[in-house]
Image (cartoon, rainbow, N blue to C red):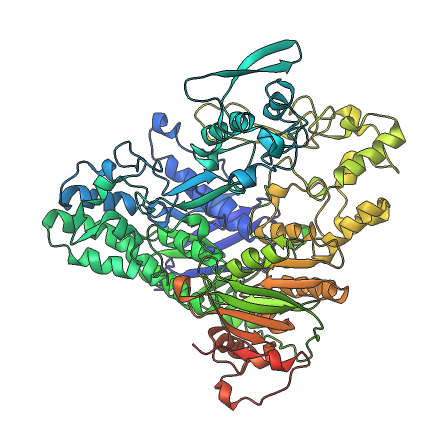
Amino acid sequence: MTEKRDEIILRGLRENNLKNIDLNIPKEKINVFTGLSGSGKSSVVFDTLATESRRQMTLNYPLYIRHQMPRYERPHADLMQHLSPVVVVEQKPVRGNSRSTVGTYMDIDPLIRLLFSRIGSPSIGSATEFSSDSSFGNCPECSGYGEIVAPDINKLIDHTKSLRESAVRFKPLAPPGWQGRWMVDGGLFDPDLPIKDYTKEKYNMLIYGPPEGERAFSKYYYKVGNRDIEWDGILPRFIRLYINRDLTKLKVISQEDVLAVTTQAPCPTCEGSGLNPKVLECKINGLNIAHYDRLELTDLLVELGKIQDPVGTSIAQQAYPNVKQLVDLGLGYLSLARNMGTLSGGEAQRVKIARHLGSSLNNITYIFDEPSAGLHPEEIEMLTHMLGSLRDNYNTVVVIEHNLAVIKTADEIIEMGPGAGVTGGEVVYQGAQAGLKKASAITDLDHKVTINKIPRQAENWFGVKNASANNLKNISVDIPKNVLVSVCGVSGSGKSSLMFGAFTGNYPETIAVGQGSIGTSSRSTLATYMGIMDDIRSILAKETGQPVGLFSFNSTGACPVCEGKGVTTPDVAFADPVTVTCEACRGTRYSEEALSHRHKGKNIVEILELSIDETNQYLEMPKIVKKVDTLKDVGLGYLTLGQTTSSLSGGEVQRLKLASHLKKVGQIYLLDEPSLGLHTKDNALLLEVFQGLVDKGNSVILIEHNLNFIAASDWVIEMGPGGGKRGGEVLFEGTPERMLQSETLTAKWLREGVGLNVKPSTLPASESPMKSERFHEVSR
């Protein structure tokens, strides 16, 4: 009798570009979905499998509870059976406010506060008293923020200018803002006199407000009259409106705008902890709660293990697994107090993974979206071990991945394709690794990286001297101009601090492309994001004599029934939500009037249905042609002008973001992991774009873990040797070929990537066409 396989059964999948496909996904296995970006991987895993599992889970709750929970529409599929509860770790960046730390994100801080409230001595009170958010627990000096932010009068005021000339450098307090106009027109100050020429009395009135016990008023003129408003001084007003609040909640201006005109220093009263000194008197084994927060996680495990009190032991045992999970993922050098916003991409990725792995439940389906993102090859080994542990604990693991090291851990490989977009949506292969080698022309598990043996020779160099921000150890580095440079190293080693901090500080003209989201939405299309939609509307308006707004589904051209959405969502009360194509516009989003006007035989919808590859044959405006060509260059020619950005895959979004920047010549480009979300074949295309930029006279600098990019570079800089305080040093500067002879971690994996399983000392030395004397490896 044959053994029956326990499988997730999916039939007739039609979400997005899926072409009515059938799949059986084995349970208690590692299942890796791979294929070109845009081939349909996310449509299967997230839009179908995860969504249906969540939808079915909510059906187990009573209606009155279900009404308060997220509601999921049934995916477009014929049959979805044998699903299990899902835990989803998406690729979205970790978000949080200025107080969000590793401890709060991992939910460890509440347990530590509870621990101190129960066994700390002297006893303080409830657990909430140990929080900087509580009225008792926060520091009276800094209001719980841990630092003193004070306005710098010389940054805030240009004393050589008058008020009318915007002597106030902070925009909300300068013209043409209402507060700036109030100072200029109110009659209390001479608006045309340089601030340095004010009398002492007038200067103090402007900066600090009226003397204590006195009041001053200044007239504010508005459209229909005027009224007197009490004047309080620039500094008191700035402190009240922009400092004594959570800066991350500011809407009109950014936190960076405020910090640009202030000085920041650790609060001397609470030593940066944000806690009341009375709270800090409470200790466990000689350490207060601030000490616990600042301990490296490896040391925190030791302290938790020292607790003998029965109540304390029970609480410590609840905190221990989450801390241990972070340590096992190579983050033992972090502390609970580490701000989430300061983590590198690789560190944040692992913290996010660890947050979802604290449960001992099994028979769960764990879904990971490119978990290798931001990780050095050395760190991927820890990731694959974690995936194996989940499977061995009788869980099903589903991974979307391009990294070959992760793909090779799979029990089952499912490759989507054969192309992307409309040319994808099919199952190209499903089975074991051995079969993939024979069946797939897309994913090559035996792929070897190619070392650049003829690097470009630099004539000039960028300089960074004595960089010491964050974990940088007062380093100096020279970076060659007009070549392709890769900056590598384990996550947290100081790459971003060096390049996005010190380097851009020295060279502010740098076009820096980080890992931030592009702000996708159902109202945003490729044409709007690339800035050519206005030109397309103008072409139609000029030819037809109609207003430009008629050709926008966000304006007067919108379908009056669906209001430009293309779909309607009828009220179905407590039933699952349903999205229906609008019957009036048939999903086009436009009114009948907008569709009646044409340019060269096509209306606005037919123009937006043109693929990127077809656009230049129809629209000849030079600005449109130039921008469309950049989309072709990054391999997005198969997408349409009207495709919404919310429907794009992670790899497509990454390339769209790059395309919006790659337009200029003679520039410095700094890109943070451009390979994220991209298949090996997509990477080869992107690499050609970067090489082309360099050939045109640009300087291209990549922060990368991808060995294909590192090997193809003209110059490589490696940071390390570890993450956090164990990093911040320059380990290597030189060509990729010289790196093969190095003893660094990246060099080890580069040798493996090219198929060299020998020690560097046995490799033949070779001279670099670039200044070989500049090569050096820094001994640890």
Quarter of the view holding residue 443? bottom right
Q: Is residue 417 visible?
A: no
- x%, y% of residue 227? 58, 11
Where is residue 314? Give x, y as percent: 16, 49
Numbered-mark total = 0
Compared with residue 416, is residue 224 higher up or lower down, i.e. above or below? Answer: above
Picture quadrant of residue 354: bottom left
Judging depth in this view, the residue of 488 and 17 nearest the camera is 488
* Residue 351: image location, x then y, percent: 39, 54
Residue at 77 percent across and 30 percent down: it is: 551
Seen as rendered, the residue at the extreme top is: 225
Q: Position of residue 184 (x, y in %)?
A: 64, 23
Write the residue at 62% across / 87% down: 766
Q: Nearer the viewer, residue 695 or 588?
A: 695
Question: Is residue 503 depicted above or below 139 in this figure?
Answer: below
Relative to 91, residue 220 above or below = above
The C terminus sits in image quarter: bottom left
Taking the image as shown, residue 553 lies to the left or right of residue 574, namely right
Q: Can residue 407 be seen from the camera position used here?
A: yes
